[in-house]
Amino acid sequence: VMIATPPDGAAIGKKIRDIGSAVGLADEAEALAARTDAEISRLVGEIAAIGGERKRVLFVLSISNGRIMAGGADTEAAALIEMAGGINAAPEISGYKPLSDEAVIAAQPDVILTMSRGNHQISPEQVFGLPSLQTTPAAAEQALISMNGLLLLGFGPRTPEAIRMLADTLYPGALN
């Protein structure tokens, strides 16, 4: 069975329902999807009410030969950043693509977001040692957030947890 997995928070409930139907647990999936959708909606509404300037977040999937592979538009990373109240710092690219040094400098991220597990784990020294990032607000504050990759990009029942975790880190004390 192929399940559509668009990088859109509004599609998570359908994904849960489709999987539940495929494995013969439609009723349980319906309940889980409804809870997940409601929690995402509640969190997004609460986050939207946070005052102040929004943080520019650059999702760094990997670094290879001094080049950043970033998450642009139409990615789970961009959708999660938006749901958590941030601004994707690389909206000019679509998907996960390498950024030129000029594009990284122009992005001026306030925060760098990475995955904390697997072969994609990136250290602060690797990130902030890059010349293209050294003049950014993120480097000035050493603002690096590392999250579990499946939590961050899985887009399933744990997505509300990921939204809250990222929003709490971006805007400490702003959520109830």
Image (spheres, rainbow, N blue to C red):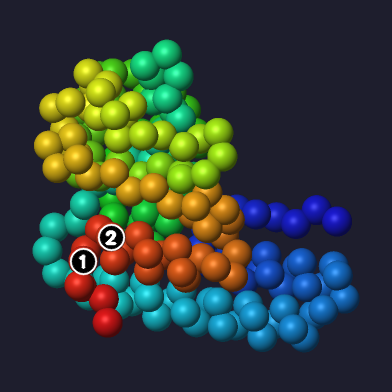
Q: Residue at coordinates 37% horizontally, 64% vertically from top-left? A: 165
Residue sitting farthest toward the top: 65
**Cβ atoms under marks 1 and 2 closer than 8 Å:** yes
Q: Nearer the viewer, residue 41 or 155?
A: 155
**Residue 107, image quadrant:** top left
Which quarter shows the C terminus? Answer: bottom left
Helix, strand or loop at label 2? It is: helix
Which structural element holds mark 1?
Answer: loop
Amino acid type, mark 2: Thr
| Residue 84 in view, yes or no | no
Position of residue 20 measured from the top left corner of the image (x, y, whole percent): 78, 73
C-alpha distance separating marks 1 and 2: 6 Å
Mark yes or no: residue 67 visible: yes
Q: Which residue is mark 2?
A: 169
Q: Is residue 165 left or right of residue 128?
A: right
How many C-alpha atoms fall within 10 Å of the one at disc 1: few (<14), some, or many (≥20)?
Answer: few
The disc label shown at residue 172, or none: 1
